[in-house]
Amino acid sequence: MRFAAKSDRGKVRELNEDSYRLITGHSNVPDAFIVADGMGGHSSGEVASGMAVEFAEQYILTHPEVFSHEESVLSGIKKLMEEANTAIFTKASESQSNFGMGTTFITVVMLNNKMYIGHVGDSRVYLIRDGVIEKVTTDHSFIEELIKNGSLTREEAENHPKKNVITRALGCDQEILVDTLTVEVKDEDIFVLCTDGLTNMLREDEILDIILKSEDPETACNELVHCANEKGGEDNITVIIIKNS
């Protein structure tokens, strides 16, 4: 398995409020990958996303028995995210400067040829298999709700004024509903974890084309960030690419 990551401030934002972690090379826990896109004023988005990935890393490393067994991985991810939510919500309520902060969150754990995923918000996981790109996660967003109930088409959603409004995030409420899922991992599968700073700038077919033309995950990450910035770089851009080869 090969992997790489890149995070960039973009062309417009003053701060990079995205955070990520690569938890790899540990003998007692499987590889795990985390992406978070923080939100809130006065740099509190940076605080929220940073807290989330730090909390997740420590939780995974201190609970190897949970994340090393297939029957407990998803419940472990769910508990991790619920506890991270509580920690961020508490921090947000302690000071005016952090009030209202929150973060999208994706964590994936690779175990026994399966990818275990937990997520909230509109950061995404994509699977590229046999030259086709598929969105594995479903956005928790206002737009996704409209698409689900038939009020809006995917094409109309592209330029909708509320396309960045999310309906779930860590830290915004006392309780959080976490989505979890499992994906079988096959030889040559490529997984992409990313924030909306990438997907708002590049179409899925453009993401696919760049990755398939890149010789390795690091080159692909660099090229994706470069192209997102070339198209305007309107938000922070974070991407992790994992190739099962």
Image (cartoon, rainbow, N blue to C red):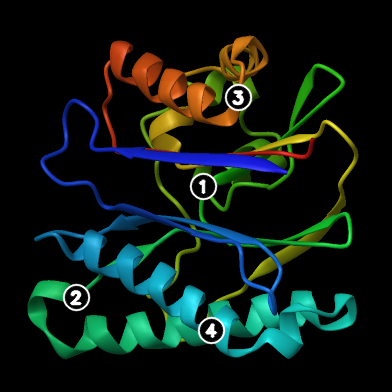
Q: Which residue is mark 2?
A: 99
In this view, the mark in front (1 or 4): 4
Q: Residue at x 30, y 89 (%)?
A: 90
Do the numbered discs 2 and 1 sit on residues whose CB atoms are within 8 Å? no
Please tell me how crowded label 2 is: few (under 14), some (14-19), or many (20+) other residues with Cα within 10 Å: some
Q: Residues within 10 Å of mark 4 (few under 14, many from 20)?
A: many
Q: Quadrant of residue 24?
A: bottom right
Which label number is shown at residue 123? 1
Q: Which residue is mark 4?
A: 59
Q: Is residue 14 above or below residue 78?
A: above
Three-letter amino acid code of the residue under disc 4: Tyr
Q: Residues within 10 Å of mark 1 (few under 14, many from 20)?
A: many
Locate residue 61, reporting x and y percent. Answer: 56, 81
- Judging depth in this view, the residue of 18 and 164 nearest the camera is 18
Q: Amino acid at mark 3?
A: Asp
| In the rendered image, the vertical position of residue 159 relative to residue 16, given as above or below | above
In front: 135, or 161?
Answer: 135
